[in-house]
C-alpha cells in the first residue's frame, strides 16, 4: 500500500483537511526488467515533487500503454498530472513576451493541458481555450458565479461566455493561457478547481439538484459527491488539488448519485450509477450499483445492474468507487479508445466475476465496509417531478425556484444577474441541473412573488415558467466552439424551440436534445426527441442537382427516471437542418408521437 492509498480515505473522511506530512512516494509496482529496458517514464515529477499518474500503474498496464493508442503514448511521455505547472510557466513566459501560444508544443496545447481542464478550441478560436471546472453536485455560490463572469468578460460577448453542461457543471470560454494561471488561483481560492475535469479523468460528480430540500429525498447526495470529488481530485498527501492516483486512467469515467426515485442524476448513462434503494430486510438506506452506461460514436450502452448494494454512507460510497477505479485504472484497455470505457472491462470479466473482483478489492482495504446483493426496487407507481418553476420544499415556508437557462448558455450579464438574485433570495446558493438550468433553493415563500418580478426574469431569456417545449431543450456545444461538431447546435436549438412553441401546443414537457455529432454529449438517446448532427442532401435550385448540406438524424422515445430507456436507432435520418425541412418533420413527430395540436392556422394556410 502506498502512502497515497493509506492517506486516501482518511483524507476524504476528514471534516477539515489538515496538511499531512508527505511520506516517501513510490509506485505501486516496480517495472519488470524487460519493460524497464524499453519504456521510460518519470515516476516523480521533478518540478512538483509529486508522483506521476503513471507511477501508480502496475507494470503490465504500463507495457500495454507503451504499445497502446497515441493518447497513451502522450501520457507516458509527459505526465498530465503536473500540467498545471506548465500553465504557470507558459503564462509567465507569454507575459514576459518570451513566447507565444503558437510555440507551445502540440501535445501540451491539444492534449496534456486537458488535465487542467483546458481544452484548446483550435479549430474555432485558435489560441483560446474552454476551461472545464468541477462542480460537485452542481452547487455554485454567487461569489463563484461572479468570478466566472469576471474571468470571461475580457474575451468579448461572443467568445467570452459561460456554459452549464450536461454534467451539472460549468465551462468558461475564451480563456487564454496567459490568464489561466490567475483563473486557476481564483478558483482554488473559492474552493473550486478545473483539475482533472477532462481527457482520461473522473468527470464531474453528478448528484441530486434537490439535495437537502426535497420532501421525497431518499439520500442527501451533497456530502457523497463532495467526498468522491475529494477522492479523485484532492491529493491525499499534500492536500492540494489534483490527485495523481487517478491521473492516468485508460479513459474518461463518469459517476452519478441519485437522491430520489426521480433519478435526476441519470444513473443509467454513467460508468457508476448509485440508485437509492432501502435494504429489504433492515430498511437501512443504501444504493443499488449500476455500471457501464455510456454514449459514444462506437456504442451507446445503458447501465447494467452489478448485483451490488452498499450503504449510503461516505465510507461505503468512497470505498466502492475507489475499488472500481483501481480495477479500471490498472486493468482497463489501453488499446482501442473506442473500447476502453468501463463496460468493456465488465464484459471481459462477466458481471458475476466483476462483482467478485470488486468485493475482493473492497475487502482488501480492510475498512470494514460491507457489500451485499442488490435489493429489490420499489413497485408502487411514481411520477418524476419537474425542476423548473416554483415548488414547495420540505422546509416549512421555503420554495425552490427552477429557472430556464436556454441551452445552458450564460452571458456575463446573466451570470451577474443570477448571482444578484441568489444573494437576494437564496442566501447566495445556485444549483445547476443536467438539463443545463438553475435552481434557486430556500427562497422564502413570502419573497417568491418579488423574485418573479425581477428584471432578469421579465421578458428575458431566463424564465421560470417557459413553454413545455422551449423549457426542455438541452444542447451540446456544437460547431460554434467544438471541433468535432457536424452542425451548429445551441443557437439553432433555441430558435427551433421558439418556432415550435408558436406552431403547436403540447400538454406535457417534451424534452428535445441536440447534439452536434455521434459522441452525444447532448444525450439525444435519452430525449423524447433527439437531434444529432449528420449528413443530409437537398436539391440545389440553381443547378438542379442534389447537394450536401448540414443535416441531422432524429431519435424518438428516449425515457429518463426510474423507467429509463435509451432510444438507440434513429427514427429519421438525412433531414436537412433548414427550417423548411426540419420544422415540419418535428411538428409531425410532435403531433403523431406526443399528441401535439396546431396552435393556430398559419397565415399561408388561411
Ligand atoms: Fe462530451 C468529447 C463537450 C458531456 C460524450 N465533449 C467532448 C469534447 C471534449 C470534444 C472536444 O474536444 O471538443 C467536447 C468539448 C466541447 C466544448 O467546447 O464544450 C465535449 N461533453 C461536452 C459538454 C460540454 C456538452 C455540453 O454542452 O454540456 C459536456 C461536459 C460535461 C462535463 O461537465 O464534464 C459533455 N460528453 C458528455 C456526455 C453526457 C454525460 O456525461 O452525461 C457524454 C455521453 C456520456 C458518456 O460520456 O458516456 C459525452 N464527449 C463524449 C465523448 C464520447 C465518449 C466515449 O467514450 O467515446 C467524447 C469524445 C471522446 O471522449 O473521445 C466527448
Ligand atoms: Fe462536440 Fe460532438 Fe460533444 Fe457536441 S456531441 S460537444 S459536437 S463532441
Image: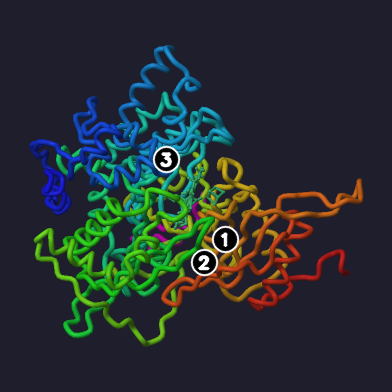
Specify whether residue 398 is in view.
no
- Mark 2 and mark 1 in contact? Answer it, CB < 8 Å: yes
Residue interval drawn in magenta: 439-456
Residue 325 within the segment the image draws in magenta: no
| Front-most of residues 263 and 89 | 89
Q: Where is residue 427 in the image (x, y as percent from the top left)?
A: 31, 52
Q: Does residue 238 appear to the left or right of 169 in the view shown?
A: left
Residue, disc 2? 526
Mark 1 = which residue? Answer: 513
Dot 1 or dot 3: first in sequence order is 3
Circle 2 or circle 1, nearest the eye: 2
Judge whether residue 461 can be spotted in this image. Answer: yes
Q: What is the number of the mark on residue 71?
A: 3
* Sequence-first disc among 3 and 2: 3
Query: What is the spatial separation of the Cα atoms under label 3 and label 2, in whole angstroms?
Result: 30 Å
Q: Nearer the viewer, residue 135 or 34?
A: 34
- SS class of the residue under badge 2? helix
Q: Determine the secondary structure under disc 1.
A: strand
In the image, residue 467 above or below residue 459: below
Residue at 52% across / 42% down in the picture?
411
Amino acid at each position: 500500500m502506498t502512502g497515497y492509498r493509506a492517506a486516501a480515505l482518511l483524507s476524504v473522511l476528514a471534516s477539515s483537511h489538515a496538511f499531512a506530512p508527505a511520506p516517501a512516494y513510490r509506485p505501486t509496482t516496480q517495472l519488470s526488467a524487460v519493460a524497464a529496458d524499453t519504456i521510460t517514464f518519470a515516476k516523480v515529477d521533478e518540478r512538483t515533487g509529486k508522483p506521476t499518474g503513471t507511477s501508480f500503474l502496475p507494470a503490465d498496464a504500463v507495457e500495454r500503454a507503451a504499445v497502446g493508442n497515441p493518447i497513451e503514448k502522450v501520457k507516458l511521455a509527459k505526465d498530465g498530472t503536473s500540467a498545471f505547472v506548465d500553465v504557470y510557466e507558459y503564462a509567465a513566459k507569454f507575459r514576459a513576451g518570451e513566447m507565444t501560444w503558437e510555440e507551445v508544443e502540440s501535445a501540451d496545447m491539444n492534449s496534456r493541458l486537458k488535465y487542467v481542464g483546458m481544452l484548446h478550441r483550435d479549430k474555432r478560436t485558435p489560441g483560446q481555450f474552454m476551461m472545464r471546472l468541477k462542480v460537485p453536485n452542481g452547487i455554485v455560490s454567487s461569489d463563484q458565479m461572479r468570478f466566472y463572469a469576471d474571468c470571461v468578460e475580457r474575451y468579448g460577448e461572443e467568445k467570452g461566455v459561460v456554459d452549464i453542461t450536461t454534467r451539472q457543471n460549468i465551462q468558461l470560454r475564451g480563456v487564454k493561457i496567459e490568464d489561466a494561471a490567475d483563473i486557476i488561483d481564483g478558483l482554488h481560492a473559492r474552493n473550486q478547481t478545473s483539475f482533472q475535469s477532462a481527457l482520461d479523468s473522473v468527470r464531474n460528480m453528478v448528484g441530486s439538484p434537490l439535495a437537502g430540500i426535497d420532501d421525497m429525498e431518499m439520500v442527501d447526495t451533497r456530502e457523497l459527491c463532495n467526498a468522491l470529488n475529494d477522492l479523485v481530485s484532492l491529493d491525499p498527501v499534500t492536500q492540494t488539488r489534483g490527485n495523481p492516483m487517478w491521473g492516468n486512467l485508460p479513459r474518461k469515467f463518469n459517476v452519478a448519485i441519485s437522491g430520489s426515485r426521480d433519478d435526476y442524476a441519470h444513473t443509467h448513462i454513467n460508468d457508476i450509477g448509485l440508485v437509492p434503494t432501502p435494504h429489504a430486510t433492515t430498511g437501512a438506506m443504501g444504493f443499488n450499483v449500476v455500471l457501464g452506461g455510456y454514449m459514444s460514436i462506437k456504442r451507446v450502452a445503458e447501465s447494467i445492474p452489478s448485483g451490488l448494494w452498499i450503504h449510503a454512507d461516505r465510507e461505503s460510497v468512497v470505498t466502492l468507487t475507489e475499488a472500481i477505479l483501481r480495477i479500471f485504472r490498472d486493468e482497463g484497455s489501453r488499446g482501442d479508445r473506442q473500447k476502453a470505457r468501463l463496460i468493456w472491462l465488465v464484459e471481459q470479466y462477466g458481471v458475476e466475476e466483476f462483482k467478485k473482483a470488486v468485493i475482493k478489492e473492497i475487502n482488501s482495504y480492510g475498512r470494514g465496509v460491507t457489500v451485499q446483493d442488490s435489493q429489490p426496487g420499489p413497485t408502487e407507481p411514481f411520477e418524476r417531478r419537474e425542476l423548473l418553476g416554483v415548488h414547495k420544499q420540505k422546509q416549512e415556508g421555503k420554495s425552490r425556484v427552477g429557472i430556464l437557462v436556454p441551452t445552458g448558455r450564460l452571458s456575463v450579464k446573466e451570470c451577474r444577474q443570477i448571482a444578484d438574485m441568489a444573494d437576494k433570495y437564496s442566501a447566495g446558493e445556485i444549483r445547476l441541473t443536467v438539463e443545463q438550468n438553475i435552481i434557486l433553493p430556500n427562497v422564502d415563500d413570502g419573497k417568491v412573488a418579488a423574485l418573479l418580478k425581477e428584471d432578469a426574469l421579465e421578458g428575458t431569456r431566463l424564465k421560470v415558467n417557459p413553454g413545455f417545449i422551449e423549457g426542455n431543450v438541452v444542447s451540446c456545444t456544437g460547431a460554434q466552439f467544438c471541433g468535432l461538431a457536424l452542425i451548429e447546435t445551441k443557437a439553432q436549438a433555441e430558435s427551433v424551440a421558439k418556432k415550435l412553441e408558436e406552431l403547436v401546443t403540447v400538454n406535457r414537457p417534451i424534452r428535445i436534445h441536440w447534439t452536434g455529432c455521434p459522441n452525444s454529449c447532448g444525450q439525444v438517446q435519452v430525449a423524447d426527441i433527439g437531434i444529432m448532427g449528420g449528413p443530409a442532401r437537398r436539391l440545389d435550385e440553381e443547378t438542379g442537382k442534389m447537394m450536401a448540406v448540414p443535416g441531422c438524424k432524429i431519435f424518438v422515445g428516449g425515457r429518463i427516471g426510474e423507467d429509463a430507456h435509451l432510444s438507440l436507432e434513429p427514427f429519421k435520418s438525412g433531414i436537412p437542418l433548414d427550417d423548411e425541412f426540419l420544422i415540419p418533420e418535428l411538428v409531425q413527430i410532435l403531433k403523431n408521437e406526443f399528441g401535439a395540436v396546431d396552435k393556430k392556422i398559419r397565415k399561408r394556410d388561411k
